[in-house]
Image (spheres, rainbow, N blue to C red):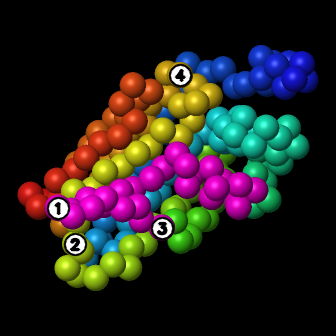
Amino acid sequence: MINFLFYFFFNVPFHALYLSTSKMVLEENQNKLEIQLKVFSDDLQTALVNHFNNQEISTIENIGIVNLSQIKSYLKEHLIPYKINAKHKWTMDLEELTADYQESIYLLTVVYKDNLHESDKAQMLEIQADYLMEVFPTQSNVIDLTYREQRSFFRLKKNKTKEQIDLKFH
């Protein structure tokens, strides 16, 4: 425990801005949501160390290669798209994840899929994006969502980790 506290207080990155951006595209048929997430590499490493209580997380430069399954597991809990219709609410499945390291930033490409029938088409999309907020209380996640050639922008923070988008009016 002392080792973890020592690690946390002396290795948690401190920088002026805790921000990530996500560009999301929901396909016309609503079966695929592709997300390009930009996150500071040191923040991602800190979140994984905290989430898995494992100080053996790889170095920043190869974290996306070595720990892809851990990143995927982390995102399944902290970046969740829900689809909602009059009958029920369901999550889309995280199908693919790639990570590209570019000068202190990771570009994560995440693909969620939904294989429900046309009759189960959603009327609303709810995005829960609370990644990094458990480690950095001032973290903001800015979302840029495109659906049917219309864009919606929203900012999620610790006190507001979800946003609903009405798909009927897009």
Amino acid type, callout 4: Pro
Residue at image mark 1: 86
- Cα separation, mark 3 vs mark 2, equals 15 Å
Which mark is first along the chain, 2 or 4?
Answer: 2
- Report x, y in % for residue 160: 36, 30
- Cα separation, mark 3 vs mark 4, equals 27 Å
- Which mark is on residue 121? 2
Q: Residues within 10 Å of mark 1 (few under 14, many from 20)?
A: few
Residue at image mark 4: 137
Which mark is first along the chain, 4 or 3?
Answer: 3
Residue at x 52% of width, y 65% of height: 94
Residue 121 position by quadrant: bottom left
Amino acid type, callout 3: Asp
Badge 1 marks a residue whose secondary structure is: loop
- Which residue is outermost to the front? 87
- Report x, y in % for residue 131: 53, 40
Q: Quadrant of the N terminus?
A: top right
Amino acid type, callout 1: Ala
Q: Nearer the observer, disc 3 or disc 1?
A: 1
Which mark is first along the chain, 1 or 3?
Answer: 1
Which mark is first along the chain, 2 or 3?
Answer: 3
Q: Nearer the observer, disc 3 or disc 4?
A: 3
Q: Which residues are magenta?
A: 67-93
Residue at image mark 3: 93
Q: Residues within 10 Å of mark 3 (few under 14, many from 20)?
A: some
Work out whether 120 lies above or below 47: below
- Cα separation, mark 2 vs mark 1, equals 10 Å
Q: Is residue 38 visible?
A: no
Q: Is residue 80 magenta?
A: yes
Which mark is first along the chain, 1 or 2?
Answer: 1
Q: Nearer the observer, disc 2 or disc 1?
A: 1
Q: Is residue 104 magenta?
A: no
